Structures are given as structure tokens and as C-alpha cells.
Amino acid sequence: MFLTAASSVNYKSSSLLKYNKAADDGERSLLETSTGASVDPNHPTPVFVYVLAFFSALGGFLFGYDTGVVSGAMLLLKKEMNLNALWQELLVSSTVGAAAVSALGGGFLNGWLGRRVCILMASFIFSVGGFILSFAPDKVVLLVGRITVGLGIGITSMTVPVYIAEVSPPQLRGQLVTINSLFITGGQFIASVVDGAFSYLSHDSWRYMLGLSVLPATLQFVGFFFLPESPRWLLQKGRDQEAREVLCQIRGDWDVDEEYDTIKTSIEEEKKEAGQGGLVILRILCHAPTRRALVVGCGLQMFQQLSGINTVMYYSATILQMAGIQDDKQAIWLTAATSATNFVFTVVGVWLVERVGRRKLTLGSLLGTGLSLTLLAVGFLLSAQNSPAVTLHPANSLNSSCSLYGSCESCILDPNCGFCYRENSTEVFDSSCVPVNLVSTDHAAWGRCLNQTEVGGGLMWAYNYCPTSYSWIVLIGLILYLAFFAPGMGPMPWTVNSEIYPLWARSTGNAASAGVNWIFNVLVSLTFLHMAEVLSYYGAFFLYTGLVFLALLFVFGCLPETQGLQLEDIEQLFSDQLFSCESSFPSNSRHVHYTRVNGTTYVPSDNDASDVE
Ligand SMILES: O[C@H]1[C@H](O)[C@@H](O)[C@H](O)[C@@H](O)[C@H]1O
């Protein structure tokens, strides 16, 4: 039984669709793609597809591991190599900057050499980077290693989701691509555990931390020697026979003729529609549906970073210190608990993505993220308003500006100062604001909090945070933030981007949007501390809250549901103007049946009968 499309649906594209929605009559019918290719959602998926997804997602693991491990390694490196703030900043940001460059360049490589070669290349680069890092004799070589690893991360971040999307059957695609994000957060979690474990070894343990990534990189490299290229890329390059063989391999005993024909027809139609010559990015911008897809893809990636995930993750150690965890080792392990929370809730995303769809998952995630950020900001606001006063103003030999501050809040917002104090169960007393030691922020440059042994003797040293009795609000805000962000806004930008571009635009579209992700990643991390100096922590978190609510409007107005559709059909969802198309997004609660009426422009009518074939 079929219902008609809503009257607002108006597909104008030449490749057209007869559009019917399956009745909600319990009949779990076949999903029918645009050429009538049938995909039975109940048909078992060959194990080989999972093997492909696993080896590809090792790229996600390396992305997560290499971005996550550096914070723990830096604690040791800065002491061993005597790194000043500029070098520390360089070693952290160079990786993210290099990832931005190589993600942008990766689009060209992807289209030219194929997904498989790019993944092989990235795992090779990761291994080389890992070796350079673990044998680095000085900080310059370390920098070269960090840049090398960044180049690998950029290529991986844009290639792996595309590869997985192109080999997956439609009804599992969301889940399998989201597994890559699970591996990213898994990599970050393992990195924090490794950081914790190796922090007990003193000399050179950073070499193991940074070098360990060679293992998964080599595993991926060896694995991909035996794994096939994406059938879609092969067909695009005219390697039809190889493409058919790969399709047979990844679809097991399914009949692959229909899927093969769908991809082939769609490649031919794409060529007619979007032309062939010229720069792909210009063709994307000149062709309305792909331009809209690009706006949605880049917008999602931008808003992912503007939601402040990396600030919250990075800042979690401080949040935990505010909550009264003073011991360094304990703080390291609790930071591991933060990344574990991020990881565990990404599992929820993998579970939900094919149940509720990308759109609802992203909207729900943004709403929860926005509310949790509000809670975080309120927690910081209350802490700031009740910030302990500075009661002692010791005359200092270094003539620093720290002694001018009247409260802990203003003292700790100056990166050169820290708060030295005593406390009993009810109040903070004997407090002073003094310069921080330039080599280690663990203690003051002079005075009572000069060295750690003294800090242990009843005196407390707070760098970056203030003692507060409102820390529990911030802690709850942090946990809720991760619980809402991780299933939706974490993975969905990657998942959606792997699906929304037609084949000819897919490499370039993903390169551009991944580039946007990395560029905003650098921007947000470089601006956070300056922003906090001007707006305070609560101001910075209120700003992120505002950006998340903007993101909510953006997603509500622009993101169509791609669940269950074959990749070749998704471009149709962008035939209408953004912000006007919400009503024409097929609801994922119903199955969508498409019938391609080749060469005819089809506009569904309001009349049930006329829309049924
Ligand atoms: O999707 C990932 C994930 O959410 C990570 O936790 C975050 O560090 C990355 O920046 C993001 O792209």
C-alpha cells in the first residue's frame, strides 16, 4: 500500500523521482532505490563489510589517539626538553594545522588515486610520524614528527568516512560510518589511559606515548594491502569489471546487478547534469544542489567545533580540579574518565543513528548540548561571583602585576598568575595572588607556594581555577555535555558529510568540510584562553551556548534525513532552497520508495491515485 507524497514535495531535478511513502502498516517492505534496486533490510550483511569498516576505522583511532595523547606527553616533554609556552603551543597546534592543510589537499588525492591508496598513504604517514616522534633527539625533530602525524590525520579524517559510506549497504551505512567516530573517541580514551599509565615512568616515557601509534598504523597498512577499492570510485574511473567484482565481494550472495546499474546510471546522469571540465570546487559552487550540500556539510563541521567539544575535553582536568581533585595523578585518571564518557556515549550514537535517523539525533544532541553548556556557564558564573578574595599582598621581588588582583577570579584569568591559599572546611583564608613558575605551572615562582613540598603542607596552589563550592554544578554540566554531544554532534557531521555529495563532488566536498572542521578546531583552541581573559570562563561558555542554539536553527532549517537512502538518491534532498526544505524532507519514520522515471521531470501531485504506479 502506498501513500502519496506531501504536496509540498517538489523534485525538479532531471533525473527524477516518483516518490511514494510506504504505509505504516507494519509491512517492513524492501527499500527501493531510484532505479528500483531493492535492498532487503533483513538480509544478513556479509562479515566482509564489517572487516572493511574495522580496518578503515583504525584511521579514526589514529586520529583520536594522536590528537589525544599529546596533552599527557606534553607534561613530561616540557620538563625534559625545557619547552617554553610557544614551543608547547607549536607542538600541539602544528598537528591540527597540518591536518587542516592535508584534509583540504586530500580531496584531490582521493579523486585521483582512490580511497584505498589514500588510506594506505595515511597509515604509512602515521607510521613514519610515530617513528620520528619516538626517536626525536630535540624539539625541532619533534615538531617535524607532529606535523607528519597531522598530515596523516587530515587525509584519514576525510577519506575513511567516504570509503565506509561507499562500501556499506544503505540500511547500515549510518551505523558503520559512525563506528569511525567511535574509533576516534576510542583513540582519545586509549590515549588518556596510556598518558596515565606512562606518567608513572619517568625518563623518556613520552617516547612510548607518542610512538605507540605505529602499531595500529602498521596494522591498517598491512590490512589495506588486501582490501579492495571502493566500487563507486572504480566505476567513476571506468574500471567497470573490477567494480562489479568488488560489489560481489561486499554484498555476498545479493544480486548486485541493480546496485551496479544504479551507480553507473547515476554517474552518467551526473556527468550530464554537472558537466565535466573545470575545477570541482567551482562546479560544486555553480550547481545549486551540491552548493547547498556543501553549505550543510561545512556548517555542521563548523558548528561541531564551535560547540566547544575540544575546549570542554581539554578543560575537563581543570573542571575536575575545581571540584576538589588536587592530586595530579588523580586528575590525569579523571581526565581519562572524561574521554571514557565521550567514548561510551558515542556508542549510544552508533545504536541510535539507524533507529532515529541523523536529523533527529543531531537536533536532540544540540538541544541537550546547549542546555548543558548553559549549566556549565551558570556553574562558572556562580563560582566567579563567590570567588574568594585575596587577603595577603606580599611584597614581591619580581615586580609582577599579580599582586594587583583583588580576587581569585581575576587572578587566575591572568595566565601569569596563580592563587596560593589555605582552607578549612568552610572557608579560604591566607590567600595571595603570585606569579606562576615559568617552567612548571604546578607551583609559584616565589613565596609560600614556591615548591611542591610546601604546597603539600597545608598550603594550596590553584592555577587556572579557583576553589569553589559550586564545582558540582560544573561537574554535572560537564557530564551532561558529553552525554549529549557524543551521540550526535560528535559523529553526525562526519557521517552526514560522507553521504550528501554526489560521487563527482564527494572527495572535494568532504575535503572542504573536513578542512573547515580542522580550521575551526585550531581557532577555538587558540582563542579560548584569550576569550576567557576578556569574558571570564562563564562568558566564554555562554558564548558557546549561543552558538549551539544558532546551530540548532541551522540544522532545523537545512539538514535533510538521509537514512536508508542509497547514496545516488541523496542529492535530490537538496533540490529545494535551504531553510525552506524542512517540509519536503522525507520523514524517516516511514519507508521511502523511489521510482526513477528516466529522463522525465516528475512532480508528485496531491492525488494519491496518480502517484501510485
Ligand atoms: O567528532 C570528533 C570527536 O567528537 C572528538 O571527540 C573531537 O575531539 C573531534 O574534534 C571531533 O571531530
Image (cartoon, grey):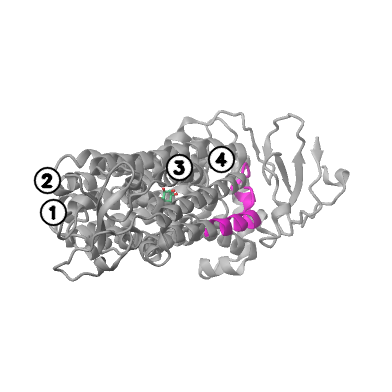
Q: Amino acid at mark 3?
A: Ile
Q: Amino acid at mark 2?
A: His
Residue, disc 3: 476
Magenta-drawn segment: 547-570
Q: Spatial distance from mark 4 to mark 3, Cα to Cα?
A: 25 Å
Lower sequence index among marks 3 and 1: 1
Q: Are marks 4 and 3 in contact (CB under 8 Å)?
A: no
Q: Please tell me which residue lies in front, 119 or 7.
A: 7
In magenta stretch: residue 557: yes
Camera-near label (1 vs 4) is 1
Tell me the SS state at disc 4: helix
Residue, disc 4: 353
Q: Are marks 2 and 1 in contact (CB under 8 Å)?
A: yes
Lower sequence index among marks 2 and 4: 2
Q: Amino acid at mark 4?
A: Val
Q: Quadrant of residue 106?
A: bottom left
Q: Spatial distance from mark 2 to mark 1, Cα to Cα?
A: 8 Å
Q: Spatial distance from mark 3 to mark 1, Cα to Cα?
A: 36 Å
Residue 50 got which mark? none
Quadrant of the frame with the C terminus:
top right
Q: Is residue 506 visible?
A: no
Camera-near label (3 vs 2) is 3
Quadrant of the frame with the N terminus:
top right
Lower sequence index among marks 4 and 3: 4
Residue, disc 2: 203
In magenta stretch: residue 565: yes
Camera-near label (3 vs 1) is 3
Residue, disc 1: 80
Q: Residues within 10 Å of mark 1 (few under 14, many from 20)?
A: few
